[in-house]
Amino acid sequence: MRDFWVAGTEGQQRDVEAFRAYIRRDQPEPANIQVAYQVDLQDRGWTDWVRTGEYAGTQGESRPVEAMRVALFNRPDTMRIEYIANMEGSSWGPWVKNGEIAGVVDGDRSIFAYEMRLLVRYEGTHIQYQGHFQNKGTLGPIESGAIGNPIDGLRLEGIRLFIRHERP
């Protein structure tokens, strides 16, 4: 609910049975925090940025993801998202944050697994993510821990991210 919005009905002569409100000052409301992301596909380049719940990548084309970028919007200045990728021919790369590149652009090295986390988050706000992997399909969603398995050597082909909000 926002300032000056109506909660309930008008002109229907119904009783109010319950009402709940809370105020957060100088910060976005938890329900407004969202995520945007894009992936770099082998031989195709970067996809367009997509938002919460949309799919970035391919399915059934055997076109691996080589890199990804993830950014939060409508977030407090102190909140950030961090993510890490496990690349073909190497191990885990460094943790990166807020729109930085995880993986290797145009490096002919696929991502085999990745992990994400929210730092300085509102209580009840979580990142959930799914990965679509070669010959395995879509795994997840999960909230914490790596998704995918570098031991299997199956390439990541797409991702879908969600921000989940529990009641405060």
Image (cartoon, rainbow, N blue to C red):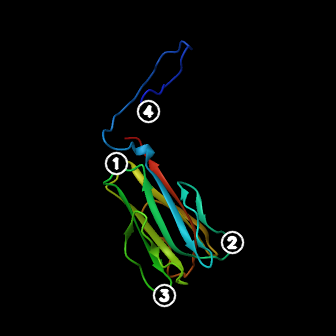
Give me the C-alpha separation between circle 4 and circle 1: 20 Å
Q: Where is residue 149 in the image (x, y as percent from the top left)?
A: 50, 76
Q: Mark 1 points at which residue?
A: 123
* In this view, the mark in front (4 or 1): 4
Q: Depth check: give the residue in front, 45 or 64.
A: 45
* In this view, the mark in front (4 or 3): 4
* In this view, the mark in front (2 or 4): 4
CA neighbours of label 1 inside 10 A, class few (<14), some (14 to 19), many (20+): few
Q: Mark 3 points at which residue?
A: 89
Identified by mark 1, the residue type is Glu
The residue at 44%/60% (across/down) is 71
Q: Where is residue 127 in the image (x, y as percent from the top left)?
A: 44, 57
Q: In which quarter of the image is the C terminus?
A: top left
Looking at marks 2 and 3 on the same chain, the residue that comes earlier in the sequence is marked by 2
Looking at marks 1 and 3 on the same chain, the residue that comes earlier in the sequence is marked by 3
Q: Name the residue under label 4.
A: 2
The residue at 34%/55% (across/down) is 79
Local SS, label 4: loop
Looking at marks 4 and 3 on the same chain, the residue that comes earlier in the sequence is marked by 4
Q: Where is residue 72 in the image (x, y as percent from the top left)?
A: 43, 56
Instruction: Kindly indicate whether the residue at mark 3 contacts the one at mark 2 (C-beta within 8 angstroms).
Output: no
